[in-house]
Image (tube, grey):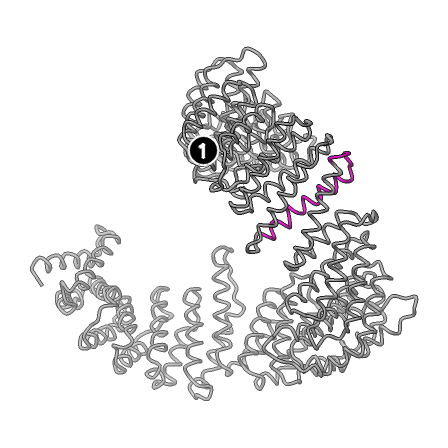
Amino acid sequence: MGDSTTINCVKHIETYVDSSSSKSPAEQDASLDAIAKLVMNDMITLESLVREMGMYLTTTDNIIRARGILLLAELLTRISSKPLENATIHSLIGFFAERLSDWRALRGALVGCLALMRRKGDISSSDATAVAQSFMQNLQVQSLGQHDRKLCFELLECLIDCYPNTVMTMEDDFVYVICEAIDGEKDPQCLLLTFHLVEMLSHLYPDSSNSLTSYAEDLFNILGSYFPIHFTHPKGEDDVKREELSRALMLAFASTPLFEPFSIPLLLEKLSSSLPSSKVESLKYLSYCTLKYGPHRMLQHLESLWSSLKEAIFTSDQSNSNKIASEALVLLQNLIQQDNGVFVNLILKDADINLTLNSLSNYNNHDDSPMPDQQRLNSIGQILHVSSAASMASCNAIFQSFFSGLVNGLEKDYASEKPKFGCLYICVELLAACRILVMKNDEVSYNENETWCIMLHSFCDSLISSFVKSIKESNEDSYTQSGVRGLKILASFPGSFSPVSKSTFENILREFISIIILKFNNTSLWSSILDSLTEIGSFIEKSQDSEKMPSFDAIIVDKMVDLLSSDDSTMPFSLKVKSVSEIGLINLKYMMKIVQELNKTIITSLHKSWIDGDSKSVEHAMILLECYDDKILPWFQNIKDSDDVATNFALKIWDEIEDNTLFYDTLVEKKLLETTMNTMKHAVATCSEENQTKILEKSFKVNESNLVNKVSQPRNKWIISLFNSVIIALHPKTNIKNPKKTLETLIESLTNGHTSSAHALGSFFNKIPSNEAIIDNTFSHLIKFSNVNAIIGLSWMGKGLLMRGHEKVKDLIKFFLDFLILNSPQDQEMVDLMRSVADSFGIMMSDSEFCLNKRLNSVIKPLYKQRLFSIVMPILSSSIVKLDSPVTRSMQHRALAHVISNAPLSAVLGEAKKLIPLMLDGLTILSEDVENRDILYNLLLVLSGILTNKNGEEVIVENAYIIIRCINKLVAYPHMMLVRETAVQCLTAMSEVSYARVYPFRPEVLQALSRALDDPKRSVRQEAVRCRQAWASVSSRSLHI
């Protein structure tokens, strides 16, 4: 290498090796990277570098020698992808292996060995043996620091993973070294490696190996001391690590059957722990180890396992969230699936289970039974359910032992009695298990001549009779739900396993549909029946059952469709619509049939409401439209090529409006119009550009006819409102054939007081390509009117342009700002105009559900709110300071509050130093007028966000006094409870500010809180109590300081 390269290299070596405080770790790392780059680019050979470093690698100065060896080791790690000569590798591996005895340079020796050993194809067996022998002779792992121990474990992992033959030749010695190395380890990161080491070691040696057999107990005693994994320090990021450690330990437990004599007794012992977490962990480990150890090993533990399992299930809380019962049932399933019948026999012969099943006649009323009895019945139901669903053999055995007795128990009921609940419940659990068994694995073909299947077929009629009886003759949810569930299961068995004939299946459907139509007052029963019908229909659809599908179509679907058009007044119309829509969700065929009827019913209801204002028709129309909007349209969005549904709906509405000339006008009609507008918007929004053009042309045609014929005012309102809805929902690429005429129509209806036209105007300029002349003309035209409607139109126009990122929005913003700054109110009309201009900033900054959102296909550029914030804030903040007029000052603060409260908090925090005084001034001024209460609350929420954000801490400390003074006044704000509650919360946040800044104001705060403690609203009083406690602690902080 050249002289300059040598000098450069030596300089970097000296920088890294230098242990003085003058060299930072960053500089040393940079030097290491530079040396690695030289070697990788062949500007210096590794051999030359080692010769250059010779003094640093062999010096008697312990610190320099350690740094030199670490430099070489780290360098090898960085050049791991560079090929090296065998001789070089052999020489280096010998050097680092020897240096494992040098405890002062141990870190570098371990790193170097690891870097070389990971070059799997380059290390010979003799070199690997040399490293292993040196490790075993020189290292006492547990005497080292955490990082060095971690490197040791990684080196042992590398030896097992990359050089298994070398490790196998060492037999007992290597296993002993691992036992010694891991014993007593406590660091979580190192423990992950130790658990993995044991797992790898177990996989390396066969079960018959003398080495592993002789050390199996020692290894497991070390592992067992860590079970269950438990952290003594506070929860935090270690929650995830605990799960990782627990899983690693479980894999180690199950890594070899040689651990079985030690692990199973330990786990059973921990299962009796009073700690729920220990029980859950024990059950998880038992489930996993059971599968890994095999049935032969587990045979001797089955009785103990069953006894512990039964106790865990019987004594655990039976709520759905109980992890102990869930894990116990998983273990139960694994044991049955693995075993050849021994474990199932333990269940069948269990005295507690047989005693309970023989006394099921005592369980007459589930809800009236003592809680222990209910829990025992539920536990046995779960055990039999899981056991039956585990395997075909276990299902047959349980049916042979118990099923006939259960059905006989149902049949013994007198005619006047409802079925015994205990028998009913267990029967349903067994039926559910059978269905799961034949449904869960499509690849396994079962024989329908299985014992359980034959028995189920023979008892089917009795079961159906009992289930129907439990539904009809009981008002208890437990009975009716079990009966419904039983019928649903019987009706949805697959293929040849189905125990019900076609006629019986149809009878079940008729029972269900009769309840839907007649028993709607029982909400719980009605809902469960509807859910069951949808599940049955979905099962038929999925399985393509050609025998049951026609019956379901005729009895359920057709009947449901007829419900919509029937004049039956007993069943609430809302329930009719709900049941019909739920059935429609099963498949496209049903939905299309139901949509056709929905469209007819909607048109009929609208027609009746328009003609005579019939309140019943109005109610029906609103229910139907809301269903269309909430369920039908979203469902079709997931169906390919289905936008014709939405298109036909929109066109039918326009056809009906075109054909009707008389419209009734009532307050209820206004609500109907709003509902129709929403549905129209969302329907048009889902259509393609081509179909949107069709709808737009139709709406134009009706609107033109309306203008020519000068029709009634109510009809005119409907036409304009729905026309606006169409414009609002258009795609940006939809072709508007006459944009000029569209714009004229929108402006004319806007000036006549149609607010929705302002929404449409904003959407028009947001989506439709417009040249600057059109924008200027519209702007100039609206300004001439000088009324509130024109200002609202300009506001929405500005919002559309702002969201789109159009430069012309600046002209509108300038107009609004000039209006607020230059005008002085002379009369109430001017005050109203100025308030509208101030509110225009709220319109432009806030999110809207009526228009200009993603669902309605708006163009939304990112950061548009921040853009308006940065334009408006400097101008308004400087203008407010100069004002004398209280009204103008109030209006500008109203505008400023709109901008601040709708801007992202991060943007406000960036300008907090300038904004806090303005916000406090605004809160004071806005609180003087009751009409400002909503915007006052929104501005106070922003202040609350600043108070609780660390980035606002500095500015809060600077302005602590004026903040507390302002908030104290708002604690008694009379016009809005939320303002008072938030003000108290702000005071609570202020108690966390620097003691020296807030303590002087403690008396003022406590005085303000005394009023809040007597507030008429409970939530305010509760916040006041918490706040008073926080401020009381302020004085105690002084003692600490």
Measuring from the top left, give residue 962's x and y in whole percent: 49, 25
Q: How many marks?
A: 1
Measuring from the top left, give residue 436's x and y in whole percent: 66, 72
Residue 632 within the magenta-colored segment of the rendering:
yes
Q: Amino acid at mark 1?
A: Leu
Name the residue located 60 percent from the left edge and 75 percent from the top edge.
Answer: 442
Task: Tell me which secondary structure the magenta stretch mostly adopts.
Answer: helix
**What crowding class fits label 1: few (fewer than 14 Cα within 10 Å), some (14-19), or many (20 or more)?**
many
**Can the viewer see residue 972?**
yes
Tell me if 260 is positioned left or right of 86 in this view: right
Residue 65 within the magenta-colored segment of the rendering:
no
Residue range in magenta is 610-636
Name the residue located 62 percent from the left edge and 27 percent from the top edge.
Answer: 708
SS at badge 1: helix
In this orientation, which residue lies closer to the viewer: 485 or 607? 607
Measuring from the top left, give residue 216's x and y in whole percent: 47, 82
**Can the viewer see residue 952?**
no
Name the residue tied to disc 1.
802
Q: Which image quadrant is residue 55 in?
A: bottom left
Measuring from the top left, give residue 9's x and y in whole percent: 14, 59
